[in-house]
Amino acid sequence: MKQLFKHSLSLILALTLVLGAAVISASAAPEVAEGYIYVREDFIDDYGFTRAVQFALNDAADHATAEAPYTVVVPRGDYEMRGAMRIFSNTTLDLRGVTMRRDGAGAGNMLRVGSEDKVDTGVTGYAYENIHLIGGVFDGGFGENTIIKAFHTRNFTMDEVTLLNEKEGHMTEFAGVDGLTIRGCVFENQQLTPGNYGYEAIQLDVLHPFHVANGRSEDLPMTNVLIEKCMFSDMPRAIGSHTAVHNRPHDNITIRGNYFTDMSSIAIQGHNWTNVNITKNIIENAPRGITLYAEPGGCTYLSSKLAAKGNTDSHASDAYQAPGKANITIAYNILTDIGTSADGYASYSSQGIAVLGEKLDTTSPVDGNDESGGLPPGDYYIDGVSIHDNIIDVRGNGIRLEDVRNTSVTDNEIVCSKNTVYPYDNYYGIVVRANASASTVSYNNISGAEVNGIQIDGGKGGKVNNVRFNRISNCGKYGMGIYDMSIDKIDDNDIMNTKNIGLFATDCTLSNVRWNRIRNCSDAGIWLTSTTTATTIKSNTTVGCADSDSFGRNTVQSHYSSASALTNFYIPWDVTDKVGAKMGVGSIFHIAPDVRPTNAIASFTYSSSDEDVVTVDANGMVIAVAEGQATITVRSNNNITKTYAVTVEGSGGVSHLTGKPAAPVLILGDADGNGVVESADTTVLLRRFAYIDIPYGDVTLSHGDVNGDDSVDVLDVSLIQRYLANINTPYPIGEPF
């Protein structure tokens, strides 16, 4: 039997502070054994649950260290709570099997870290460390105060905690925390009357008294946040922040593997977040799914204002500074029934995923209530965003990007339905606008957009490099609508059944518009207005459109007016040595066939050899269900088949399995990639720009574009022939590049 000992004197002193002159028998003290403090049931009976547990937590505060932490164990049972418990450094509170019920309206917090401070006195920095909650049910009883709070803390962890029945406040609120981990927790039934501010079940906040009562004001952001495998239901917003610090972002935030249902505002909303991973979440029935803002003019605080209010040090400049890399990844999420109801708190546009920067032309106004704002003018763009392999069922915008840089949108499935909440808004499958720049918008499958499948609007600046291999159908207006934008490549897109034009561009500068297949549109297949210039427009197919004509040069270059039979296709993308994929459980992978020849109008079906391992939908979105192996078969409408082996293992993302060793050194002019330049390379090039079947895909564009004009044409063939005839050329044909 473990030897027991008691810290009787410290307990008596603690009780005297909490209860005044009440005399507590030493025999009623909690029992301590090798770093564990066991709260006694008779102590709870005599002094009430809150006081009894607090005595144990105070004892842990007096004796626990980082090297010798304490665990307070509460006996299983159902308890009424009166007053808040306070937990301090190096303490674990084990509440497994414990249900706590708070009094209703007017009740205070149920648990908070540390002491209550004033706005300008008390602890600073990360004063409390290494705090862990295990299990327990916190029933808020619809009290109008946050259930759990932690400020000025390093390493706060919640495992398998349940929080229920909150009203007019957050379920949990964190500010100035470095190292927040919330795993396997349940959040349910949070009510908020419009006009109040406690939107989030998990609020990542700033230390300002309007938002955080009884905590000292300071410019500490939230850092190193992990929220995973939690469940959220019946609340306004599940995870997020509506406050931020200017030039000091909330950093390193991972939200993965969570389940959200029945939101009345949004599942995930962030302000000024960097180094973000939002992956493998399931969101069902919400006005909005995921939205990340830059530093909005409102709700963002100048560091100096927070420091002055708290009599603390400022750690960031109040001047405008160009944003650093945000490094945001939003991937493998499944969003369903988004935009079926209005946001209950403001008229936000219905949307699945949005990343929104903001440009301020003047100093932002200061809010008279919470003192936020006052940001200097400047472009608060978001730099570095990857949105890929998400499945989105939405009544509104599928993916919306504004004022972003270095962004890619790839391999997403977006199924749109008519929005009846805000029926006068214009909704798109993917919209890129307001000074936004993207490296690629490619391999997406979009159907049913109310207006355009892809809307790219550079009216306030911006550039998109590639718009390729998108499959777009059944749009209310255009398959693609492109306005005042510079785009390098609009290649290999498949557009069908639009109620107006398939591909429309005005006031644009386009380099290449090639190999697009457009069919059954109610107006022109491709229409480029007189204010649009394009370097190369060729090999596009328009079939079954009411008006297959297009503007200007498009009518005099080489195009197809009839469909061809599919002779071959490749999966995935342009690289033929990818023969399979390794997927983590919960990840998603899009198989997007690349058809040959270019004017082959093809459709595909997909099947899985083992749906207990992976499933695949009608658009080629493969979902990893459980560990194991399976084969995905892709079959064209004329019975050409390809197979793709999938191994599901672990919990990571997607990596490709290759059937060939690493590629050899690239040789300029070596179109077939065998390491030498020979007459076969000219044949490959001729077949490539005629779009006849070849086994090398777009590798020829890098190997065979010997004059560097970003296209493969007869001039490149002529130059290679000159090289083979030992006639000098101005290009280093036959040499590595």
Image (cartoon, rainbow, N blue to C red):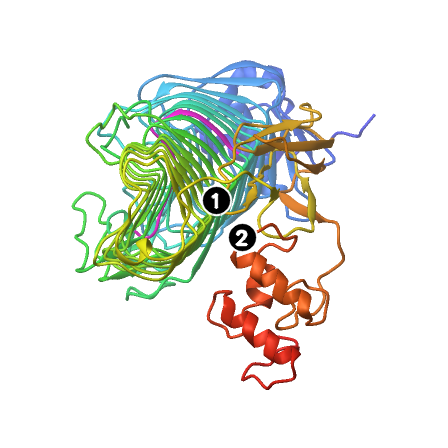
**Which numbered dot is residue 599?**
1
Circle 2 sits in a helix, a strand or a loop, which is it?
loop
Q: Does residue 202 appear anywhere in the picture?
A: no
Q: Main secondary structure of the magenta part?
A: strand
Residue in front for this viewpoint, 556 or 142 = 556
Please tell me which residue is depicted at 56% across the width and 76% down the height of the picture. Answer: 719
Q: Callout 1, which amino acid?
A: Asn
Residue 61 vs 672, above or below: the answer is above
- Percent across and percent down for residue 645 are 71, 37
- Disc 1: CA contacts within 10 A as few (<14), some (14-19) or many (>=20): many
Residue in front for this viewpoint, 342 or 95 = 342
Q: Does residue 422 appear anywhere in the picture?
A: yes
User: Would residue 372 be found to the left or right of residue 574 on screen?
Assistant: left
Circle 1 sits in a helix, a strand or a loop, which is it?
loop
For the N terminus, the image quarter is top right
Please tell me which residue is depicted at 25% across the width and 29% down the height of the picture. Answer: 345
For the C terminus, the image quarter is bottom right
Tell me if residue 353 is in the magenta stretch.
no
- Percent across and percent down for residue 202 are 43, 34
Q: What residue sits right under mark 2 in the picture? A: 691
Which range of residues does the magenta coloring cover?
281-295
- Percent across and percent down for residue 491 are 44, 52
